[in-house]
């Protein structure tokens, strides 16, 4: 999850991916996932709230178009598993939904931005309580570096070197009205 | 969100909605094989029950455990006064052990509020005398929302020993604030003093005639009536109470088939509620119990998991 | 040793000096101070006859951790009192001549105010058998006021016999009017809309009124004298007004707190405001003030009820009843009552009437030559913010903490001895 910022507040922001870039990146990721998995058997796409969920659905649509059948898509909220719960006011968790279950599946976690790795760490813990996947992979639209944990993505839309103080924001039409990745 | 939960007054309508939204997610966790979330790992919750209540205590205990809190039950029968220790000393002693939250049940009205002024821990009122039982009211409202959707404009009828009911006092606040139309029914001897002025100000109706209001009810909440009240001259006999104010088989027939029947438990079958009503398809008594855990998880999470809001 | 009180406004009227010798007022007017006389500057102060409290709990014997006769006497003196009646609900109860004499002697040893014991009406305050009323009356303590205060003498037969019996020695029964049958054993506040909302068991006003009504009828029937302690409701006032019109020998007192505080203070469940009889709604407070002003209620009595901190730090229904009152009584009366309630009225309700009701010879005079020199000197316009930690009582259950009150006792003189000077206790023999 990355915060969205209005352009008016961030005059120095610049767009690093537009809607077409995002679309191409997701198509490539979809193909990579299929190649790596040697097809869509046992695949389970699991989007991390908030923007990982629409991304997982978009990837799911692309895979379905290639394979000719649906792959299951779920959503995962990791709020209760975060290690920084105590540093901010609580908020209501989003829906965690894993229709059909993840036991024995190849779970691909999908998120918008990979940064410190803490969200993914929380997601791995949450998966533990939901079932026992055969394997877990990670797909992200943007990898901006600055990892704080030994975590890496298997599928990356764009590697985006950034300064620690910069903000990388992903906008998606489903959540924000339009597609784009901006850095400020 | 509030620091302590002592009364429904501590929660805005938005707060209540947040509690319900989170409770819905917790309800899903309840149905999982692994019923565990790490949100309260390392937090200590004391269930301090000065008055017996297996039901509420277990519900809080399960809620705490599923959120990975360390929960400890302390039961002290009778008031601390009878042991020669002041209530202040009792709770300060317990909190000195290093406690994050005190879930407290006490036979005295106002006890939770008083205790919140004496300790640093978060205090959650699990029932104070005949004053309030806010978590019960929240689980009632949650259950009603599950069945009815929004409570806006829905007619809820509450029946029973209003004078001695903390469930009534909390529900009046939550239901009216959530937009429900509320009618409370009891014999005059079981209506709290001054309820005329109170109901006018708070915006609810009172009635002595259950048959007159029941056909118009979208939901009915039966309150427990203690048989000991007969000794106090509040009503002449169990039979007379059941005929006048019980949810009998005949009355059940006048209630809409979709109108949920609630009861905070434990039920006096045959007194305030007939077996036919307690076991009817529209009875949501067990849903209330299940919702109780989810709502308490939600509350524990919101009151304990976050950082200092300031 | 002579004492000259310089320039006090007598009962708020003309300023005069008072010359005191051997505890008696010897001269009033413009008096030059004799050589060696103690001079008490009272310029700008109001002189009242020493205040008399009909209703004080000094807790000794039994609860010396809450108050003793000595510490209670100090609080009384600071509050401008020169005599107090010590209630009988101690442990053991003051229900024998010996117990009464013991309280009398403790008061004399303290030496700050005249401590007059009140005797119990019934043995052990149990409400069943009469205590040895006659022996207490014949004792050195010369007990004339009898009360089971804290409990009501609710058995009509017992009350009737007590009223009859005390006629033999001019005694009076001070009744704590409260029918225990009209409220549960856990009643702890006024029964009304607020108690309904708070879920607190309450006493309805009627629980007091039915006993007041019964007792005035018993007083009429027996031809005896009844005193109603701490009247708290408008209904009781109505009954009293009727009884007086009938010529029934009934007197009544009201506490300072019932003249100013209302039941609304209970919203926070603070046991500091838990008192018996309970704080009532505003309409009762208004009626009580009017009754005090028109004489339907004769006297103000503090019902000073000190409690150890740990007896108040319980849940509201479990906490002890009562609040401090001696040190603040005069300021509260001054604050609660309207301007039209003058200093002669204050003298009437806080000194003269209580002394008359209690039969305390020498107290409740008129600051005239030849009378015992019990004098309370008051700064009428002082604005005081009450600080419970400044109290000389041992207890801190002070409902006035943080409140601003008008009028302050500056000096207290008992039998020619200055017990309080400039608001502070003086060592003996000043």
Image (cartoon, helix red, strand yellow):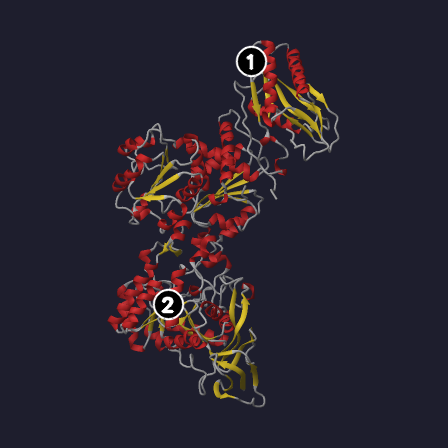
Whether residue A15 appears in this view of the structure is: yes
A87 vs A144, left or right, is: left
Q: Give the quadrant of the C terminus of chain C.
A: bottom right
Residue that sits furthest to the left in the current view: C221
| Numbered badge on residue A70 | 1
Q: Secondary structure at mark 2?
A: loop
**Viewer-closest of A58 and C288:** A58
| Numbered badge on residue C211 | none
- Which residue is drawn at the image coordinates 36% and 45% (left, top)? B162
- Which residue is drawn at the image coordinates 24% and 71% (left, top)? C221
**Viewer-closest of B125 and B245:** B245
Question: Label 2 belongs to which residue?
Answer: C229
Chain under numbered label 1: A
| Residue C314, percent from left and from top | 47, 53
Q: How far apart are labels 1 and 2 at the CA level?
A: 87 Å
| Residue C189, percent from left and from top | 40, 56
Q: Secondary structure at mark 1?
A: loop
Q: Is residue C52 above or below residue B135?
A: below
- Which residue is drawn at the image coordinates 44% and 56% (left, top)? C264
Q: Is residue B110 above or below residue A157?
A: below
Chain under numbered label 2: C
Could you tell me how many numbered marks the image carries? 2
Q: Mark 1: few, some, or many residues within 10 Å (few <14, many ≥20)?
A: some
Q: Is residue C362 above or below residue A67?
A: below
**Viewer-closest of C103 and B101:** B101
Q: Mark 2: few, some, or many residues within 10 Å (few <14, many ≥20)?
A: many
């Amino acid at each position: 999850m990355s915060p969205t910022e209005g352009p008016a507040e961030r005059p120095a922001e610049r767009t690093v991916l537009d809607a077409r870039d995002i679309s191409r990146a997701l198509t490539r990721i979809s193909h990579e996932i299929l190649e790596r998995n040697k097809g869509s058997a046992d695949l389970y796409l699991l989007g991390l709230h908030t923007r990982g969920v629409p991304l997982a659905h978009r990837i799911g649509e692309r895979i379905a178009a290639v394979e000719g059948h649906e792959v299951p898509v779920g959503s995962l909220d990791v709020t209760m598993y975060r290690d920084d719960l105590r540093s901010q006011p609580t908020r209501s968790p989003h829906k965690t939904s894993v229709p059909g279950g993840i036991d024995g599946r190849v779970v691909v976690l999908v998120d918008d931005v990979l940064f410190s790795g803490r969200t993914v760490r929380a997601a791995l813990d949450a998966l533990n309580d939901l079932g026992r996947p055969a394997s877990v992979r990670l797909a992200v639209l943007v990898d901006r570096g600055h990892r704080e944990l030994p975590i890496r993505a298997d599928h990356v839309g764009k590697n985006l070197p950034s300064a620690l103080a910069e903000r990388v924001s992903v906008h998606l039409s489903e959540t924000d009205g339009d597609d784009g990745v901006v850095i400020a | 969100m509030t620091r302590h939960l002592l009364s429904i007054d501590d929660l805005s309508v938005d707060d209540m909605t947040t509690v319900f939204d989170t409770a819905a997610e917790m309800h899903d966790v309840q149905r999982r094989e692994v019923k565990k979330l790490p949100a309260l790992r390392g937090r200590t919750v004391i269930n301090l029950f000065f008055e017996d209540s297996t039901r509420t205590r277990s519900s809080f205990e399960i809620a705490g455990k599923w959120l990975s809190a360390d929960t400890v039950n302390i039961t002290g029968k009778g008031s601390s006064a009878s042991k020669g220790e002041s209530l202040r000393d009792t709770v300060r002693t317990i909190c000195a052990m290093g406690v994050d939250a005190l879930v407290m049940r006490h036979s005295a009205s106002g006890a939770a509020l008083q205790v919140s002024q004496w300790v640093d821990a978060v205090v959650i009122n699990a029932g104070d005398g005949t004053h309030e039982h806010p978590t019960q009211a929240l689980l009632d409202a949650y259950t009603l929302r599950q069945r009815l959707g929004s409570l806006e404009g829905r007619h809820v009828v509450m029946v029973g020993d209003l004078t001695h009911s903390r469930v009534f006092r909390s529900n009046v606040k939550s239901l009216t604030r959530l937009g429900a139309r509320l009618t409370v029914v009891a014999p005059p001897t079981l209506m709290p003093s001054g309820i005329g002025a109170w109901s006018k100000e708070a915006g609810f109706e009172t009635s002595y005639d259950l048959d007159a209001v029941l056909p118009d009810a979208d939901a009915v909440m039966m309150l427990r009536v203690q048989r000991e009240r007969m000794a106090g001259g509040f009503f002449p006999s169990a039979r007379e109470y059941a005929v006048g104010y019980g949810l009998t088989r005949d009355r059940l027939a006048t209630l809409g088939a979709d109108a949920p029947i609630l009861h905070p438990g434990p039920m006096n079958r045959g007194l305030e509620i007939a077996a036919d009503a307690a076991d009817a398809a529209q009875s949501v008594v067990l849903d209330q119990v299940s919702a109780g855990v989810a709502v308490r998880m939600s509350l524990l999470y919101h009151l304990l998991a976050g950082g200092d809001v300031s | 040793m002579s004492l000259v009180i310089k320039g006090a406004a007598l009962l708020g009227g003309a300023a005069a000096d008072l010359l005191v010798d051997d505890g008696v007022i010897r001269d009033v007017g413009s008096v030059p101070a004799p050589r060696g006389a103690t001079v008490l500057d009272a310029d700008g102060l109001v002189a009242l006859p020493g205040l008399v409290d009909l209703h004080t709990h000094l807790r000794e014997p039994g609860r010396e951790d809450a108050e003793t006769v000595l510490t209670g006497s100090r609080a009384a003196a600071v509050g401008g009192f020169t005599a107090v009646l010590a209630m009988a609900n101690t442990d053991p109860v003051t229900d024998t001549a010996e117990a009464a004499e013991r309280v009398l002697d403790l008061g004399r040893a303290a030496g700050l105010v005249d401590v007059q014991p009140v005797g119990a009406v019934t043995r052990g305050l149990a409400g069943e058998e009469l205590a040895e009323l006659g022996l207490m009356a014949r004792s050195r303590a010369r007990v004339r006021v009898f009360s089971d205060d804290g409990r009501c003498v609710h058995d009509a037969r017992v009350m009737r016999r007590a009223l009859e019996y005390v006629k033999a020695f001019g005694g009076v029964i001070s009744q704590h009017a409260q029918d225990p049958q009209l409220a549960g054993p856990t009643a702890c506040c006024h029964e009304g809309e607020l108690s309904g909302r708070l879920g607190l068991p309450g006493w309805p006003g009627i629980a007091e009124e039915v006993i007041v009504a019964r007792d005035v009828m018993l007083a009429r029937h027996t031809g005896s004298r009844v005193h109603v302690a701490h009247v708290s409701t408008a209904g009781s006032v109505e009954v009293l007004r009727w009884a007086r019109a009938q010529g029934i020998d009934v007197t009544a007192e009201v506490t300072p707190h019932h003249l100013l505080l209302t039941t609304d203070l209970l919203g926070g469940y603070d046991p500091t405001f838990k008192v018996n009889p309970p704080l009532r709604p505003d309409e009762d407070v208004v009626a009580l003030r009017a009754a005090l002003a028109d004489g339907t209620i004769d006297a103000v009595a503090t019902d000073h009820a000190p409690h150890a901190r740990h007896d108040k730090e319980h849940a509201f229904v479990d906490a002890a009843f009562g609040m401090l009152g001696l040190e603040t009584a005069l300021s509260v009366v001054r604050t609660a009552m309207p301007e039209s309630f003058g200093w002669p009225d204050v003298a009437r309700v806080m000194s003269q009437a209580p002394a008359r009701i209690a039969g305390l010879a020498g107290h409740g005079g008129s600051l005239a030559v030849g009378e015992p020199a019990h004098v309370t000197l008051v700064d009428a316009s002082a604005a005081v913010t009450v600080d419970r930690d400044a109290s000389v009582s041992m207890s801190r259950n002070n409902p006035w903490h943080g409140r601003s009150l008008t009028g302050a006792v500056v000096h207290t003189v008992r039998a020619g001895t200055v017990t309080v000077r400039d608001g502070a206790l003086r060592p003996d023999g000043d």
